[in-house]
Amino acid sequence: MPRDVAARRRRERSGRLAESFCAWHLRLRGYAILARRFRGPTGEIDIVARRGSAVVFVEVKLRRTLADALESLGPQQRRRIAATAEVFLASRPRLSGLDARFDVMLAVPWRLPVHIADAWRI
């Protein structure tokens, strides 16, 4: 197997593990996980959760440092996530009356994830 393919598989596996860890972190804080890795025609959302009257769209960023993780979410990716969130909400009319929120969870090896609630607005 070529080295770049092996490296990509390792990154994919690490990303999935970080998403699972973040989902458990959210569950422990009272969030109900509605979907993981939701795919729409415009992209993917890592975690969709609900807590109270809010539907929360969570992007998980795994990097070596918190600064790198925070910098890795650009405006184009935020627009893609927002468009995919609209698709998710349109497919679930029972959630239409709830508030939508966009959060980021920063994952760094050997540390608890950092949850930034309401990281941006559309």
Image: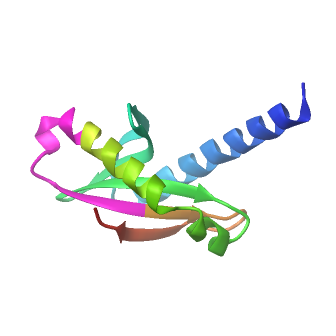
Task: Work out whether 101 lies above or below 95.
Answer: below
In this rendering, would 43 be left or right of 19?
left
The way the protein has been coloured in the rendering is rainbow
Write the residue at 51% across / 62% down: 74
Examine the rendering and report whether any part of residue 45 can be seen.
yes
Q: Position of residue 112 (x, y in %)?
A: 60, 67
Examine the rendering and report whether any part of residue 29 can be seen.
no
The quadrant holding residue 10 is top right
- In the picture as drawn, the residue positioned furthest to the bottom comes out as 67
Magenta-colored stretch includes residue 11: no
Magenta-colored stretch includes residue 92: yes
- In the picture as drawn, the residue positioned furthest to the left comes out as 97
The quadrant holding residue 45 is top left
State the count of labels: 0
The quadrant holding residue 38 is top left
Looking at the rendering, the stretch of residues picked out in magenta corresponds to 89-103
Q: Position of residue 44 (x, y in %)?
A: 45, 40
Between residue 76 and residue 58, name the one nearer to us.
76
The quarter of the image holding the N terminus is top right
Q: Position of residue 97 (x, y in %)?
A: 9, 50
In this rendering, would 108 be left or right of 59?
right
Write the residue at 12% across / 39% down: 94
Task: Work out whether 100 lies above or below 4.
Answer: below
The quarter of the image holding the C terminus is bottom left
Task: Work out whether 38 lies above or below 74.
Answer: above
Q: Position of residue 115 (x, y in %)?
A: 47, 68
Between residue 73 and residue 10, name the one nearer to us.
73
Write the residue at 30% across / 66% down: 121
- In the picture as drawn, the residue positioned furthest to the front comes out as 76
Between residue 75 and residue 121, name the one nearer to us.
75
